[in-house]
Image: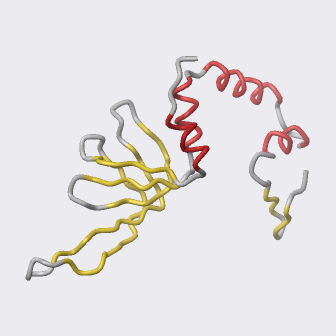
């Protein structure tokens, strides 16, 4: 495993965290085994939601705004929480026309499921199709 050193800090490339934990001296292997068991026992829909973590989502709402941010969580009611979010909205002019899109940085945002009109994940086409297919297996 390659680790990038930065002034005493070690950055671990994505996907190599388990190997890095096993190599560290102060690691308790029981906690890793417990998390692996929890991942294996999770329902397929929960596994798919976990795959969305830290991915960039584009979420549209009823009033025409679009939120672009990283997926943080989804609650039982279907509300989505995004972080590092930017809001895009059309600003109407007095003459019935629309000005260019206005944007502002919001940070963390909760988007209620009742207001959501669209939701898109920024990833490859194959990953999108896999995320959309919900199988009972």
In terms of image quadrants, where is residue 24?
Answer: top right
Q: Residue drawn at (84%, 37%), measured in percent from left and top? A: 27
> In the image, residue 125 lies at what x, y percent?
58, 49
In terms of image quadrants, where is residue 89?
Answer: bottom left
Image quadrant for the C terminus? Answer: top right
Question: Which residue reaches farthest left?
Answer: 95
> In the image, residue 25 lies at what x, y percent?
91, 41
Nearer to the camera, 67 or 126: 126
Q: Residue drawn at (44%, 52%), measured in percent from left and top? A: 82
Give left or right: position of 71 versus 104.
right
Give left or right: position of 137 versus 21.
left
Q: Residue drawn at (33%, 32%), measured in percent from left and top? A: 77
* Vertical order, 36 against 59 (above or below): above
Give left or right: position of 66 versus 31.
left
Nearer to the camera, 44 or 137: 137
Nearer to the camera, 2 or 58: 58
> In the image, residue 29 lies at what x, y percent?
83, 29
How is the model colour-coded? secondary structure
* Vertical order, 19 against 133 (above or below): below
* Vertical order, 17 against 102 (above or below): above
Nearer to the camera, 97 or 84: 97
* Vertical order, 51 against 106 (above or below): above
Give left or right: position of 23 versus 75.
right
Q: Residue drawn at (60%, 51%), measured in percent from left and top? A: 124
């Amino acid at each position: 495993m390659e680790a990038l050193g930065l002034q005493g800090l070690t950055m671990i490339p994505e996907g190599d965290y388990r190997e890095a934990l096993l190599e560290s001296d102060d690691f308790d292997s029981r906690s890793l085994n417990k998390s692996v068991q929890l991942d294996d026992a999770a329902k397929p829909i929960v596994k798919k939601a976990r795959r969305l973590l830290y991915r960039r989502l584009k979420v549209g709402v009823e009033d025409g705004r679009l939120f672009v941010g990283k997926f943080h969580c989804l609650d039982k009611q279907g509300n989505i929480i995004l972080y590092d979010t930017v809001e895009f909205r059309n600003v109407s002019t007095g003459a019935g026309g629309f000005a260019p899109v206005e944007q502002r940085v919001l940070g963390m945002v909760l988007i209620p499921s009742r207001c959501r009109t669209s939701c898109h994940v920024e990833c490859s086409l194959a990953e999108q199709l896999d995320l959309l297919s919900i199988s009972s297996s």
